[in-house]
Amino acid sequence: MKIKWYGQSSYLLKSEEGTRVLIDPLGKMLGYKMPRLTADIVIVTHNHRDHNQVHIVDGEYVLVDKAKKYDLKNVAIQGIPTFHDKDGGAKRGNNIVFVIEMDGLRIVHCGDLGHTLSEEQVAAIGPVDILMVPIGGKMTLDGAEAFAVAQQLKPSMVIPMHYWTKALGLLGRFLFEKSDRFLGLVGRHRHERRLIVDSQSLEPEMTAITLDYK
C-alpha cells in the first residue's frame, strides 16, 4: 500500500490492486493546495471545509460519510461515531473515526477527534496497524491527548496529522501545535516522503511516521 499526505487530514491510499481511497480532501488552505485527483472511494469524516472538498475529485467515486459498514472494491470500511470536542459534540459537532481494511492492513483515520476513546469505542475499532491521529490541539486532540489515544489503540505505526507545518505560516501558529510534543512522547520516529507499507514492514514497536505534504 502507498500512503500520500496532502496536509491537514488529507491522505490518498493506493492498494496493491490500484484502488484509490481519498480521505478528507482539503482543497486549498493557506499554504496547502491539493491537486485535482481521481479516486474510487472518498471518505469524509465530518462536514467541515478543510475535510469535505470533494469537488477536487474527478470521475466517478463512492462517497463514504456515514458511521456504518461498507464493502467496496476489496476494501472494508467501518465508521465509528465520535465527537469533534470533549462535550459530546456541543461545541464542534460530530466526527467519524473510520477503520479501513485493505491489503491485509487495518488503518484507522481519526478525523478531527476531540476526545480520548471510551472502552466501547476502542472495542469497536479493534486491532490497529496504522493510526492517523490529529495532534494540533485547539480544535482537536493535542499532542498529549493524541498519545493517550495511541496508547489505547496500540498501533504499529502512528501518523500525526492536523498540526502546524511551514505551509500554515504565522497564522497557523495560533491555530495548531507543532509535532514536537507528540513525537517526543512516542519516542520512536522516522520521516518519509510517502509511506509504502505492507504487513511484513510494520514496526515491532509503536513508531511515529511523519510525511511530506508536497
Image (cartoon, rainbow, N blue to C red):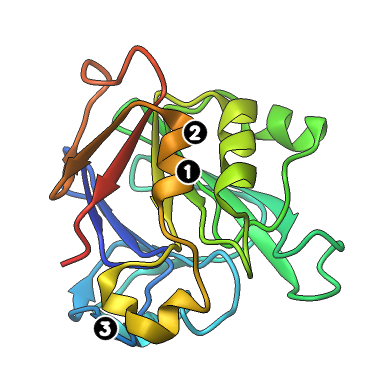
Q: Is residue 76 visible?
A: no
| Amino acid on which disc 1 is placed | Phe
Mark whose residue sits in front, 1 or 3:
1
Mark 1 crowd level (few <14, some 14–19, many ≥20, 10 Å Cα): many
Q: Compare marks 1 and 3 and give the one earlier in the sequence.
A: 3
Q: Kindly identify the residue that appears in the image at 52 percent across and 76 percent down.
A: 175
Name the residue nearer the viewer: 211 or 183: 183
Proximity of marks 2 and 1: CB atoms separated by less than 8 Å:
yes
Q: Which mark is residue 124?
A: none
Mark 2 crowd level (few <14, some 14–19, many ≥20, 10 Å Cα): some
Decide if residue 122 is on the left or right side of residue 201.
Answer: right
Mark 3 crowd level (few <14, some 14–19, many ≥20, 10 Å Cα): few
Residue 33 position (above or below residue 163): below
Quadrant location of residue 138? bottom right
**Residue under label 1:** 182
Proximity of marks 3 and 2: CB atoms separated by less than 8 Å:
no
Q: Which mark is residue 31?
A: 3
Q: Secondary structure at mark 2?
A: helix
Q: Compare marks 3 and 2 and give the one earlier in the sequence.
A: 3
Q: Secondary structure at mark 3?
A: loop
| Amino acid on which disc 2 is placed | Leu
Q: Which mark is residue 185?
A: 2
**Quarter the N terminus occupies:** top left
Residue 103 position (above or below residue 203): below
Q: Kindly identify the residue that appears in the image at 56 percent across and 64 percent down.
A: 45
